[in-house]
Image (cartoon, rainbow, N blue to C red):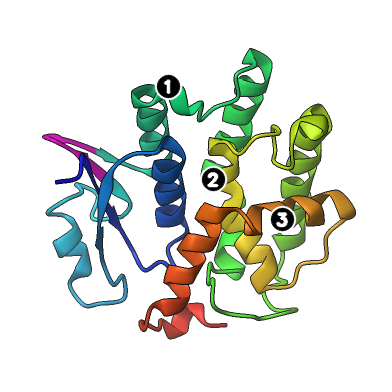
Amino acid sequence: MAEFVFYHGNKNYSSWSMRGWLALKLAGADFEEVGFHLGQQGVREKIRQHSPTGKVPALGHGELLIWDSMAIGEYLAERFPEARMWPEDAADRALARSVSAELHSGFPALRSHMPFNVRRSSPGKGRADGVQQDIDRVTEIWHTCRERRAHAGAFLFGSWCLADALYAPIVSRFRTYAVDLDEISRAYCAATWEHEHVREWCAAAAAESWVESRFDL
């Protein structure tokens, strides 16, 4: 029996589930998965059996339940210190937490008008009010992080860390909607898209048969 149980939504549509799953992979945790079709009637009541919010993701660890992707990531970082899920440098770690928290609470226009959909290709769509401002802020964050640690590797703080796992669904959105990016941002997106854990999630998303028309713009 696996040590953890990860409750998640459709891999093609659930960006927060992707974040939690990538955190588990980064930690090197032994986990099993329980997936829910988020468009299915009565699914919220089914999820409530495992998460008090009726939302995913959630993580079961024995008698303990952790919900919300950020809380899952922080819990795993404490449980698996050897995985170095946050940057080692204290200043980098503070910045990584800041940009992760901003992601967690921000970019509402981008979320609303460019829904997460790994399989879809919708170039030019989703350009509603506020979206470009959100895109500009994301790329500004990426520049700030990359300028500090460009010499150390291809990711935000050099090595792949929890901040990268949290921004990976944004990379997927930018691909889906063919967002025009600067050279630094394109390079970061390419490195993220080729990361083995991202590729594994995307392959599973592509294999799903569930279709949600509201997200297929």
How packed mark 1 is, by other alpha carbons closer than 10 Å (few <14, some 14-19, many 20 or more), is few
Observer-nearest residue: 194 or 57?
194
Q: Quadrant of residue 46?
A: bottom left
Find disc 1 in the rendering and name its residue: 81
Q: Magenta segment, which residues?
A: 59-65
Q: Amino acid at mark 3?
A: Cys
Q: Which residue is mark 3?
A: 189
Amino acid type for the residue under numbered disc 2: Leu
In the image, residue 105 sits, relative to residue 92, either above or below, namely below
Instruction: Give me the C-alpha separation between circle 2 and circle 1.
Output: 18 Å
Judge depth for marks 3 and 2 and give the one in front.
3
Q: Residue at x 80, y 57 (%)?
A: 186
Q: Earlier in the sequence, mark 1 or mark 3?
A: 1
Q: Quadrant of the C terminus?
A: bottom right
Tell me if residue 40 comes above or below residue 87 in the rendering. below
Q: Amino acid at mark 1?
A: Pro
In magenta stretch: residue 104: no
- The reply to whether residue 195 is in sight is yes
User: How far from the left and from the top, in percent, is residue 212?
Assistant: 41, 81
* Marks 3 & 2, CB-CB < 8 Å contact: no
| Res 111 quadrant in image | bottom right
- Between 120 and 135, the one lying in front of the other is 120
State the CA–CA distance, disc 3 to disc 2.
Answer: 13 Å
Seen in the image, is 86 located left or right of residue 59? right
Q: How many numbered markers are drawn?
A: 3
Q: Which residue in the structure is indicated by mark 2?
A: 166
Residue 211 placement, left or right of 93: left
Percent x, y of residue 141:
74, 40
N-terminal of the pair, mark 3 or mark 2, is 2
- At 51% from the left and 53% from the top, the residue drawn is 197
